[in-house]
């Protein structure tokens, strides 16, 4: 199996991932320390969200670093791309857990969300994704890469939209100004996550 050649313009994304990884690392440490002080489930779930995103970013940076160094999207990249997508799935699940923990709503949706995440997880690691392979290797063969990525985007979009809806309703019912401010921040952060995909 041959590898796709590295595109030089991807270096900007590589450096972007490095900056985000460093920022994510420090924010994750801050979140974990915050959880250790409070020892409550919402802080734990939010810490896990940050851990998942940071591990995903670092893994992507390592995969792109190997591609930049060798000039080919080879073995590490082939693992890092689907693995980082799996980290996004885990982060989505724990972000939903965080939301239902603070709003006490929609707990019955947790198991379908986890089951759907597992299906997408398996799909991302199937050999028919051809991560990093050159087009000649899979020309005329089954290629599910587009559908794997699309399922991840739809999954995340659905979870973020659901969280946005839950938080919007909770925000209207909140009386305490500090709680209202926190819910607003979380609501806006979820809105900004949607265009990321």
Image: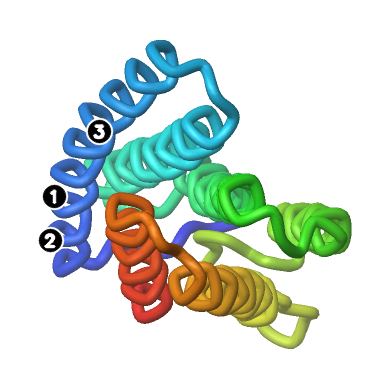
Q: Residue at x 16, y 64 (%)?
A: 8
Give whichever of 30, 106 is nearer the camera.
Answer: 106
Q: Which quadrant holds the N terminus?
A: bottom right
Give whichever of 116, 39 is nearer the camera.
Answer: 39
Q: Earlier in the sequence, mark 1 or mark 3?
A: 1
Q: Left or right: 105 with respect to 66?
A: right
Q: Which mark is residue 12?
A: 2
Q: Left or right: 60 with respect to 154?
A: left
Q: Are marks 1 and 3 in contact (CB under 8 Å)?
A: no
Q: Residue at x 36, y 80 (%)?
A: 195
> Does residue 3 show up?
yes
Residue 11, above or below 21: below
Q: Residue at x 41, y 54 (%)?
A: 73
Q: What separation in Å lies between label 1 and label 3 (alpha carbons)?
A: 18 Å
Residue 58, above or below 35: below
Q: Which quadrant holds the C terminus?
A: bottom left
**In which image quadrant can residue 105 be found?**
bottom right
């Amino acid at each position: 199996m041959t590898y796709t050649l590295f595109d030089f313009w991807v270096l900007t994304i590589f450096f972007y991932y490095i900056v985000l990884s460093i920022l994510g690392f420090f924010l994750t440490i801050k979140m974990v320390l915050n959880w250790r002080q409070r020892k409550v489930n919402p802080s734990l779930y939010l810490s896990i969200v940050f851990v998942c995103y940071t591990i995903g970013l670092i893994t992507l940076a390592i995969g792109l670093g190997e591609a930049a160094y060798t000039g080919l999207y080879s073995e590490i990249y082939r693992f890092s791309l689907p693995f980082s997508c799996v980290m996004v799935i885990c982060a989505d699940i724990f972000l939903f857990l965080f939301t239902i923990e603070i709003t006490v709503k929609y707990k019955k949706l947790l198991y379908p969300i986890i089951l759907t995440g597992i299906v997408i997880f398996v799909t991302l690691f199937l050999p028919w994704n051809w991560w990093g392979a050159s087009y000649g290797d899979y020309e005329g063969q089954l290629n599910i890469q587009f559908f794997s990525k699309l399922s991840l985007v739809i999954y995340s979009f659905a979870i973020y939209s659901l969280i946005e809806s839950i938080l919007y309703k909770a925000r209207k019912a909140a009386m305490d100004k500090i709680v209202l401010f926190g819910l607003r921040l979380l609501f806006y952060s979820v809105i900004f996550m949607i265009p990321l995909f």
